[in-house]
Image (cartoon, grey):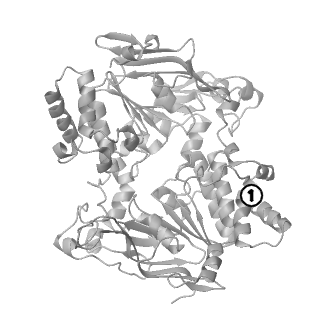
Amino acid sequence: MTRLLDVENLTLQFDTDEGRITAVDDVSFTLEAGEVMGLVGESGSGKSVTAKSVMKLNPSNAIYGDKTKIMLHLESGSIDIMSLKSSKDLQVVRGGAISLIFQEPMASFAPAITIGNQMVEQLMIHTSMNSKQAQEFSIEMLDRVGISDASTRFKQYAFELSGGMRQRAMIAMALSTKPKLLIADEPTTALDVTIQAQVIDLMKDLVKEFGMGIIFITHDLGVIAQTADKVAVMYLGRLVEQGAVRDVIRNPAHPYTKGLLAALPSLDDLDTPLTPIPGDIPSPLERPPGCVFNTRCSANLGARCSSEIPGFSPVSDSHTVACHLYNEEGAK
Amino acid sequence: MSDDVLIRARDLSVHYPLSGGGLFGPKPVVKAVEGVNLDIAKGSFFGLVGESGSGKTTLGRACLKAAPITRGTVQYTDDEVDYQLTTIDKVQLKDYRSRSQLIFQDPYAALSPRMTVRDIIAEPLEVMGLTKSREETDERVREIAEKCRLNLEHLRRFPHAFSGGQRQRISIARALVSKPHFVVADESVAALDVSIQADVLNLLKEIQQEMGLTFLFISHDLSVVAHVCDHVAVMYLGRLVETAPTRELFNAPRHPYTKALLSAIPSLDPDDAGKAQKLEGEIPSPTNPPPGCKFQTRCPFAIDICRVDEPKLEHSSSGHEVACHRWQELMD
C-alpha cells in the first residue's frame, strides 16, 4: 500500500467571544491509498473539524498549532497542506484531490441550480473536460450510483429528489473528479436504515472501483464496523484509541470506547439494561486537565489521570490506546 | 372490550389536503395515516417504528388530538374519564390536555431560551391552573425535577447552560409535571449521543414504572425500541403492517418489511457484512401510493394478489398481528 495522507500533531483552536477553545489537540494519524478510516466520537469531539483541516476548510477564526503538519502524497508529488494560503492554491486540494460529502444533502446542493449544472461546473474547474464531455460524464456518474433515469435527474433541482437520491447524487458529484481522498462527514446519518444500507453498499463498491482513501466520520459504531478498515476514536479533541476495526470493536481498550459499546442497544441481548457513560461531555471551554476523559471515567486512577496526559501505548501490533491503565501495567 | 386499554383507535385516518390539482378533479390529499386500528394498553411502553414519511408522528399526534382526524375514532379511557376525541368538547379537551403530554425530539428547539428552567417546568401547571398557590407550584416543580435527576440548583438557570442530555431531562420534567396518564415521546432520544441516550432511556423507563404512565414511544431506531418497549407497531406509508409484543416481533418478525428493517441495522460485527437482506428503492410518496399492498413496490416476495388487494391486519391469539398475504408461506 502507498501512503496517502500524514497528519501530524494537528492542533486547532478557535477564537470565540467566550475565549479561545481547543477543538483538536495533538492528533496524529495516517491513511493509505484505498483504505477506509472511521473517525468516531460524540458531538463536540472534534471529528468534523479534524477532517476539514485536511482541506483547510475551517472558518477564519481557526488557529492551527505550530507543530501541525499535514502532508498529502499524490503521484505528482507531496503537498504540504499547511503551506497553502490562498484559496487559489487550495483549489488543487479542495474538490480536486480531496472531495467532501456532507451530512445533510439538502443543505449542500445549491437550491436554485440544477443538479447537473453543479456537477458540470466542478468538472470544468477541476478537469480538462469541455462542457459536453462533462455533461455526458455526469450523467454516467449519476447512473453509476444507482439513480434511475439519470438524464432526467440531471436536469432537476435538489428539492425534486428524495433524501436517499440526493445523497447518491452528492456521492456521484464528489467522485466525478476522481479524488484521491474522500472525506465523508456523517453521510448516512440523515437517512433511514434501509436507505443507509443501500448507501453503505454503494460506497463500498466505489472504494473498490476507484481505489481512493476515505475518512468516514460517524457516531455510529455499527456503520464503522460495516465500512471501515481501521478506526480512530475521538473524545473532546483528542484521539484516545486507534487500530484495526476488528481489534478496536472486539477488544476495546480505552474506558471511553468500552463505555460507548456498552451504551449501544444491541438486538442480540434485550435483557441486559443499557449502561450509560455517567455525566456529560464537558464544554470545550472547560477541558479537564490530564486525560480528557477522567471526569467520566470509571477506571480513574486519581491524581495521575487528572494531571498527566496519557501517551499512546500498544495493545497489539495494530492497536494503540492513550490511557494510563496501559502505561501502568504494560501491555494488558 | 377489555378495560385495560387506554387508547383505542379504530379505522383512524388523517388526510392532509394539498394545494393544486386539476380544475375539475378532486384535490390531491396526503394520506398520512390510513385506517389504523390500535390498542394501547394501560401502563404499557408502546413502540411505534417506521421510516421517515411512514406517518408515525401524525399517528402520535392524532392520539393527542393535535392532528385533524379525517375518519375513524380515537377513544381515551382512564380510571376517571372516557373521551371520544372526535366529538370531545372544549372543557373536556382542556382536561385531556393535562392527561396527555408530548415530549419532542429536539431538546434545543423545545425550550424557550428566555425562561428559567423553573418557569419552563412550571408553565403547564400555571397555564392549566392545576395548582392554587406559588408554593404548591414550586413544590410540584421540585418534586418532578428530582425525579428527572435535575439538580435543584439548576432551576434558576436558563436552558443555554445545559447539555443535550440535561435539556432532554428538562423537557421530560415539563411534560410530566401535570401528572399525565398518557405520554407521546416523539423521537425523544434521536438527537442525543449514544452515551447520553442510554441514560435518558433508563430514566424514561424508570419514571414510567414509578408513575404508572402509558407511553407511546415513536422512533426510527429499532434497537432502541427493542430495549425499552413491551409492545411494538411497525408502520409503512400510513398503515400498520405488523404489531406484536416486543420479543415476539424481534424473534419472529412476520412482515417482509419488518424483516428488512431488522436486517438493515448495521451490525457491530465487521464480518457480518453481506448477509443482510437489502431493500431496493425508497418509500413511495403518500400522495400517490401504489395499489394493493403499500409495500409491494419494494417487496421481494410480491405476487399478483399483492398488486391489487390490500392485506388487512390478521389477528392472532398471541397478540401478534400482521398485514401480509404471504406471511405464512414465507415463515417456512
Subunit of label 1: B
Q: Residue at x 31, y 26 (%)?
A: A212
Position of residue B99 in the picture relative to residue B56 (left or right): right
In the displayed structure, A185 sits above or below A153; it is above
Point out the residue furthest to the right here.
Answer: B135
A187 horizontally vs B168: left or right:
left
Q: Which residue is mark 1?
A: B119
Residue B95 visible to an observer of this rendering: yes
**Viewer can see residue A198:** no
* Residue A195 locus on image (x, y percent): 34, 50
What quarter of the picture does the C terminus of chain B occupy?
Answer: bottom left
Side (left or right) of B328 relative to B178: left
Q: Residue furthest bottom?
A: B1
Q: Quadrant of residue B71?
A: bottom left
The one of B259 and B14 positioned closer to us in this rendering: B14
Please provide percent x and percent y for residue A13: 59, 23
Of the pair A48 and B21, the residue shown nearer to us = B21
Q: Residue at x 50, y 63 (%)?
A: B218
Q: Is residue A246 above or below residue B312?
A: above
Mark 1 belongs to which amino acid?
Asp
Q: Residue at x 38, y 60 (%)?
A: B53
Determine the secondary structure under disc 1.
Answer: helix
User: x%, y% of residue A78?
Assistant: 36, 10
